[in-house]
Amino acid sequence: MRTAARGATLVLLGALLAQAPLTAQAYQPREPEFRTGPTGPTTPTPEPTAGPTPEPTASTSSSGQPPARSWSEVVKQVSETSPGDVQLRSADTSAQAASMLRCFKLDTENYCLGLGFVQEVPTGPQRHALMAEPSLRAADEMGAEQDISTGDLTPAAFVAERAALPKTQRVTAELDEMEAAWNGRAKARELRELAEAETPPPNPETQQTPQSAIAQPTAPTTPPDEATTAPTSTPTVTPTGTPTVAPTRTAPTGGTPTAVPTTPVAPVAAPASAYLMKGFQTSQEKGYWCGPATFQSIDWADDNQKDTQASWAKDLGSTTSGTAISAMVKQTNLKTAWPKSAGTYIVQNVSHWTAQTFFTVHQKHLGVYKAPVIEHVQLLKRYFPYLAFNHSGHYQVGRGYDKAKGTIAIFEVFNERRFNSRGNVTDGPKNIPASALFNATLANSFQNIGL
């Protein structure tokens, strides 16, 4: 009986030991990639991949493409991302805007079709917002009457015109635009670095708008080379210095764009004042021909041959809706010698600039490179007091400046009286406070210039 009892006890003890948990020292995990530590389980360490994980926000464009390092890569990316005809016809306005205003990264710089070089790629909602008509009536001008459109192409019209093209023609137009961008990417980088160097860090307690943060010099006077009309009601820029960035000398190309090495040159300070193109002002012949008139003046001063505005309207692709700034830049590179001193002309967004940067860049381009700027403004009375009415987006010739007075000299190509008997005589050379011209550029939906 004792033997039987002892056997039963051993059996019961064995069963109890089999059900008891193992101690930590005895536990040998079978899956070493999943370990239990003192603070709890940790996730398995992933196996190393063959290459680095892409970072879309830093190294890819809004179209999902990596930075283009050669012209052939640009051609491939533009061609592959351009939508088909059926897809575009069925797309809504927002989708069309996203397609026609696609952005690409050219080496280190962001370029968006229609918009130009940008510091930050716009989001989908931001591109959609561009499709709304810009406000032609300022809050402090409730009684101001809005008159005719003067001839720039609005973002909505630009998108509609590009979307209406068959894909083959649309890709050709996009590549024509991208050619200037590719050849001018070094200039865009210099402008971006200049803007970043001149932009002070934000301070919520002292931050001001570009216009209110600018000192007010004395009223502008007539430039020494010819009579002008200068508004005096808008504060202006007092420059603190000029950049020492060497010009990018990239010659325009007729075929496949290639990088042209630049020869280092000694920094040249901009003179106190400079004026170009004396006697080459023009006046637009049709209400929507500010583009052809501006280009007529720029080309005339280049080769001393005054071609007709009708011929330039054809070359620029101008319609009753207006002229695209990308077309203005393209023809400047193709038909004039201004890029020999100023480098390839580009479309440059200025929304991230300060008024001081805007004025500094004009001094460099006009005073050192001695080449005109394609101004792209909203023609409103608050910025151009010589007007009797408010008008639409508009082109003007930037052709001089005076540092001491804080003014930029332009050729105004629009004569209000020609198209409205109640309008003022407004065409000809003008001196504009630099801050007024900067704010007029920001008032335009595109917020860009050609230089």
Image: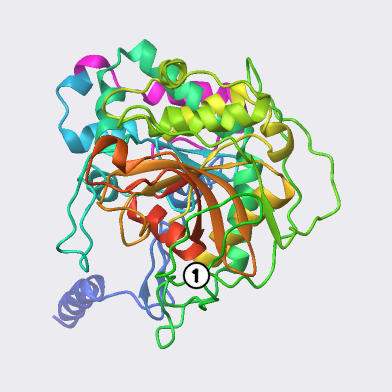
* Residue 354 seen in the figure: no
The residue sitting at the bottom extreme is: 205
Instruction: Provide the residue span drawn in magenta.
Output: 61-86
| Residue at (15, 64) in percent of width and height | 142
* Residue 11 position (above or below residue 437): below
**Residue 264: percent from the left, percent from the top?**
84, 45
Q: Please tell me which residue lies in front, 71 or 3.
A: 71
Q: Is 241 situated left or right of 45 in this image?
A: right
* Residue 392 seen in the figure: yes
* Residue 142 position (above or below residue 189): below
Q: Badge 1 is on which residue?
A: 236
Callout 1 amino acid: Thr
Please tell me whether mark 1 sits on a helix, a strand or a loop: loop
- In what quadrant of the picture does the C terminus appear? top right
Q: Is 437 situated left or right of 402 in this image?
A: left
Q: What crowding class fits label 1: few (fewer than 14 Cα within 10 Å), some (14-19), or many (20 or more)?
A: many
Q: Is 252 situated left or right of 154 in this image?
A: right
Q: Please tell me which residue lies in front, 420 or 55.
A: 420
Q: Quadrant of residue 37?
A: bottom left
